[in-house]
Image (spheres, grey):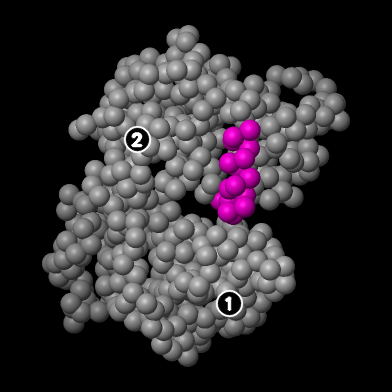
Amino acid sequence: MTQTTLSTPDTPLAVEMRGIVKKFPGVLANDHVDFELKRGEIHALLGENGAGKSTLMNVLAGLYRQEAGTIRVKGSPVEFHSPRDAIKTGIGMVHQHFMLVPSQTVTENVLLGLDDPRFFMRLPQYDEKVASVGERFGLKVDPRAKIWQLSVGEQQRVELLKMLYRGADVLIMDEPTAVLAPQEIEGLFDILRSMVAQGKSVIFISHKLQEVTAIADRVSVLRRGVSTASGVPSRGVARQELARLMVGREVIFILDKKPAVPGDVVLDVGSIHADNDKGLPALRGLSLNVRSGEIVGVAGVAGNGQTELSQVITGLRRCKKGEVRLGGDLVSNRNALFGIEHGMAYVPEDRNHVGSAPNLSVTDNVIMKNYRKPPVSSRTGLLDMNAAAKIATDLKQAYDIIAPNVSTPVRLLSGGNLQKVILAREISGLPSFMVAVQPTRGLDVGAIEGVHRLLLTQREAGAAVLLISEELEELLSLSDRIYVIYEGMIMGEVRVGGGESDEALIEAIGLMMTGTPIEQIRKEGVGAHG
């Protein structure tokens, strides 16, 4: 395996990791990995699922201890026994899932875990200190606001404030754009550029190659625990090359998407209202439709009713008002089996706990929807496991599911292969309608390519596909139409490939994702082709 060598640093190093080895039972997660971070740079760390990048950063953040290798911070050797040790040397990690207390204020969250104040908290005094740090780095957020009152982008700023207030010079950011709208992503990038301009250093972990090349100064890539590229200038490498370094083969980014030929309406959602798990309104008069032979996307920032929408459609959540029809038949407030019998397929957001039974085998998982029918079910009502194993083996080969055999429990599969098991089960039933929720979340570029091909194959076979995703690039690549959801309501609908520039379309979608109705956008002159 050819490795691109580390570049000779022309500026001082903030972090230097040499020969890092980290093992888990049966797994060599990091195999003598080298990594260096210069002061005042944004360094992207890429790798497919299981490549070892999160493990490497957890070693640097003090969550894991390496079996071999050395770490230097600002030239001095260090040994970390906990994240507290790491933060004392100026290293902090901002996790993808925020670690904030919703009922407390911004300042209270920033101060949590600190030795100062110890006994008496003069909140107004500390509000001023937090506001001063925020102003210095362009992190605009009200110190007195409760966390639950803040947008997702503002909550991320609080996480950054927590690290900066503690004096962090190195910030490790794990998938920081996963929950942000396009405008919020640009805002985050501006903040990161401001931070490095003031001498901070950032490690940017991401699956999104386009963002990496836009924000990073240098890029390092891990594959199967080994470094395949270290410190490569991002402006000198193409996305295709980064993808090849990640997965070890060429990845096709431009999808062969034929023009849509929509047929009759298959899914018709009419003015539905539904509550979330807390009993609060999640869907408020939402309407949309999907025709045969088309992919319709639903764009929105996480937590705006997407999960509840998919659950109402599939019979997993009751709606209080409105109705859902599939092929003209009323399916709302019916059980999931009713939808299955009417040609519905479902790829849920949570592939581990909802989409699969982790402790059961590949065979058991792929027959979950057709075990009542021949050839799996015999005349006596017993399961023919030989027939089931034959079906599973055929699907394993057809969908390129990498597993030792079809008796392997699916909990032992990678995220990408588990998703293939779910897709194989759902697609093999020849559905007339499929709802896919975050079908590529957490997958590497190679697995994403495979999932996209399968969804397009369904579209070409005449199925209606509803794609709910927070990845705007994915929606623009696959969808024929896109609805934008905000606080349980549809802000507007746009057609993809309707003659607009990508920039105008992304701007319009981004505005709708943050609550601006399409009618207002059109009045203000922003392109939004209906």
User: From the viewer's perspective, is 163 left or right of 224?
Assistant: right
Give the residue at x 73% y 40%: 140
| Secondary structure, magenta segment, majority class | helix
> Can residue 181 be found in the magenta stretch?
yes
Give how far across and how far down residue 100 sits, in percent: 65, 40
Circle 1 Cα neighbour tier, 10 Å, few/some/many (<14 / 14–19 / ≥20): few
Q: Earlier in the sequence, mark 2 or mark 1?
A: 2
Query: Circle 1 is placed at which residue position?
Result: 530
Compared with 9, 256 (above or below) is: below
Which residue in the structure is indicated by mark 2? 221
Quick one: 423 or 342, which is closer to the camera? 423
Rendered image quadrant of residue 324:
bottom right
Q: Which residues are magenta?
A: 179-194
* Residue kind at label 1, given as amino acid type: Gly
User: Magenta stretch: residue 496 in it?
Assistant: no
Q: Residue at x 73, y 33 (%)?
A: 134
Nearer mark to the viewer, of 2 and 1: 1
Q: Residues within 10 Å of mark 2 (few under 14, many from 20)?
A: many
Q: Quadrant of the C terminus?
A: bottom right
Amino acid type assigned to the residue bearing label 2 in the image: Val
Element on which disc 2 rests? strand
Residue placed most toward the observer, 500 or 242:
500
Q: Position of residue 465 (x, y in %)?
A: 42, 74
Residue 309 position in % (x across, y down): 55, 70
* Secondary element at tag 1: loop
Q: Is residue 249 left or right of residue 173?
A: left
> Would you identify the image quadrant in which residue 198 lies?
top right
Q: Is residue 322 at least partly visible in the picture?
A: yes
Q: Residue at x 29, y 40 (%)?
A: 245
